Amino acid sequence: MSELRRDKEGYLVDLTQWSPEVAEATATLDGLVLTQAHWAVIHLVREFHARTENSPAMRPLVRLVREKLGSEYGNSIYLMQLFPGSPAKRIARIAGLPRPTNCL
């Protein structure tokens, strides 16, 4: 694989370079070990991006997770536990997607 090019915030410059291995390496840099729960959200966000060409900010992310995985998972507390800090930005970075707009 060619060297990964990232912007100053760690997002892939070339989205086609993403792979599950890249996700694992990115998560490791963030101090995370990806579980099935993480992967469920990552796959949802990648599917959302494939349909809309956008990375969801926090509110749309919560709504997406609630619709697809259920209300017990579709809340900001759950997402913060999985992806501490700024879940929408962290998920997008690990999922190899652009930084969500409207995220501080």
Image (cartoon, helix red, strand yellow):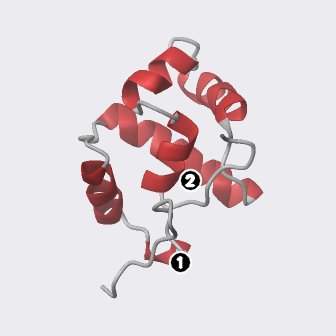
The percent coordinates of residue 86 (x first, y second) are 52, 35
Report whether 75 appears left or right of 35.
Answer: right
The percent coordinates of residue 2 (x first, y second) are 34, 88
- Residue sitting nearer the eye, 103 or 2: 103
| Quarter-of-image position of residue 102 | top right
Q: Which mark is residue 46?
A: 2
Q: Amino acid at mark 2?
A: Arg
| Quarter-of-image position of residue 25 | bottom left
Residue at 51%, 76% in the rendered image: 16
Q: Which mark is residue 34?
A: none
Residue at 33%, 57% in the rendered image: 26
The percent coordinates of residue 74 (x first, y second) are 58, 20
**Label 1 element class:** loop
Residue at 66%, 55% in the rendered image: 49
Q: Callout 1 environment at 10 Å: few (<14), some (14 to 19), or many (20+)?
A: some
> How far apart are the two marked residues, 2 and 1, measured between alpha carbons?
15 Å
